[in-house]
Image (cartoon, rainbow, N blue to C red):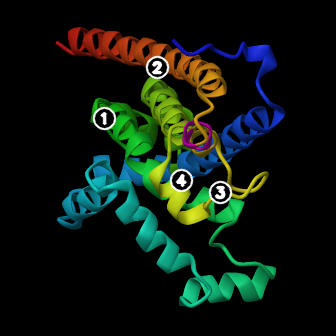
Amino acid sequence: MNAITPVWALPGELWHSLLLTLQLAGISTLLLMLLALPLAWWIAMSRSRIVSVVEVVMAMPLVLPPTVIGFYLLVFLSPTSGFGQWWQNMFGQPLAFSFAGLVIGSCIYSMPFALQPIIAAFRMLRPETAQAAFALGMTRIQVFLHVLLPLAKSGIYSGAVLAFAHTLGEFGVVLMLGGNIPGVTRVASVALYDEVQKLNYADAHGFALVLLALSFVLLCATTLLQKRQERWRQTASFSGR
């Protein structure tokens, strides 16, 4: 059996890749929340026929192979595309094989994990809640920020944790889009793959255990939030009878 490198003895480049991954996950999750909250509210409350199409498009990353998403993102963000060329002219560097490109790719790839729990939370809200707030003179934005968001907070927290955890485990998309540039795009999953490729199983074991423990903590948090949301739904359903 191969030895396992203790956590405190892991090479510095592995810890640097983990810090880069946490940074990527944090920024991506923040942007996803800003995008997913209004989008989830519109999907949950709109009666437009286009809602079903939008839901399907947003859920595509759940079923598409990560390499497919990574390839098309690489094409879309490359300097030969309109958007990629605009970005390079504006900021002086390409999006492909950059940290900014990884953030965009992570937001797209993790969108359904953030979006679906929030949609479910909004759909559980009773319409009378918003109507009562409107009757008290609150504006649409005030109702959304001060009434509906607090009531849906369990679903919002679940979406944020799932998006963060999913970004930590990305491999195919980040490898296709960012490559393996140390300090720029070499995230934890790619660093672990490198150690395995080098047959450095001792460091790979130790680093994998770190990622396993981190994922376990995040999964426990998600489970607790989902149970809390389920209890709230049962209470709301009972009180509405």
Residue appearing at x 44%, y 11% in the figure: 224
> Which residues, given as a range, are shown in magenta?
193-197
Q: Left or right of 148: which side holds 102?
A: right
> Is mark 3 in CB contact (under 8 Å) with mark 1?
no
Of mark 3 and mark 1, the one earlier in the sequence is 1
Q: Quadrant of residue 174?
A: bottom right
Residue appearing at x 35%, y 64% in the figure: 68
Residue appearing at x 51%, y 38% in the figure: 169
Give the answer, above or below, for where 217 lies relative to 111.
Answer: above
> Is mark 2 in CB contact (under 8 Å) with mark 1?
no
Q: In the rendered view of the protein, which quadrant contains the C terminus?
A: top left
Query: Badge 2, how many Cα within 10 Å: few under 14, some, many 20+?
Result: some
Query: Badge 3, how many Cα within 10 Å: few under 14, some, many 20+?
Result: some
Q: Nearer the viewer, mark 1 or mark 4?
A: 4
Q: Residue flagged by tag 4: what amino acid is it? A: Ser
- What residue does disc 1 label? 120
Q: Quadrant of residue 78?
A: bottom right
Q: Nearer the viewer, mark 3 or mark 4?
A: 3
- What residue does disc 2 label? 219
